[in-house]
Amino acid sequence: GGYDHAFLYSAGTRYDLGTMGEPSSAAGGINDAGQIVGSLNGGTRAFFYEKGIMTDIGSLSGGQTGAVAISANGYIVGSSAVGSAIHAFFYSAGVFKDLGTL
């Protein structure tokens, strides 16, 4: 339908990760455990994907958010709008830490 979908490619097969009801999704990072992070609908929401389940991880303050990388320990980093500024974030165990701006 003209929209992008994040996918996992493994052993010659492509698996659509879905969109959680949004028009599109884009993967930002994957770790060796197969956990994937990214954004929905052009960066309006960040997601975490594991074992067939996509979860909206929220944002710093309700603004546009995208996850770009995930470590082997499951730590997630990305960016989120806070007012008119874009802040970096660190996310672990359901908690966001605002890393601020440069």
Image (spheres, grey):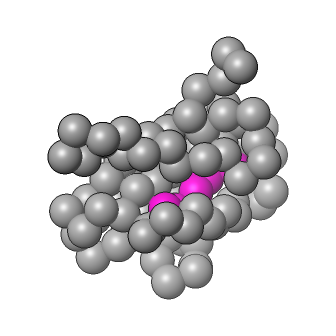
Q: Is residue 90 left or right of residue 40?
A: left
Residue 44, quarter of picture: top right
Relative to 77, say whether 16 is above or below. above
Q: Position of residue 43 (x, y in %)?
A: 65, 38
Q: Position of residue 26 (x, y in %)?
A: 52, 37
Which of 53/30 is in front?
53
Which residue in the rendered view is the most extreme toward the top?
2
- Residue placed at 71% from the left, 19% from the top? 1
Is residue 102 among what the camera can see? no
Is residue 72 among what the camera can see? yes
Q: Which residues are magenta?
A: 45-49
Q: Is residue 91 left or right of residue 34?
A: right
Residue 32, quarter of picture: bottom left
Which of 38/63 is in front?
38
- Residue placed at 25% from the left, 68% from the top? 33
Q: Is residue 45 left or right of residue 38?
A: right
Asked if residue 46 is among those painted magenta in the image, a careful observer would answer yes
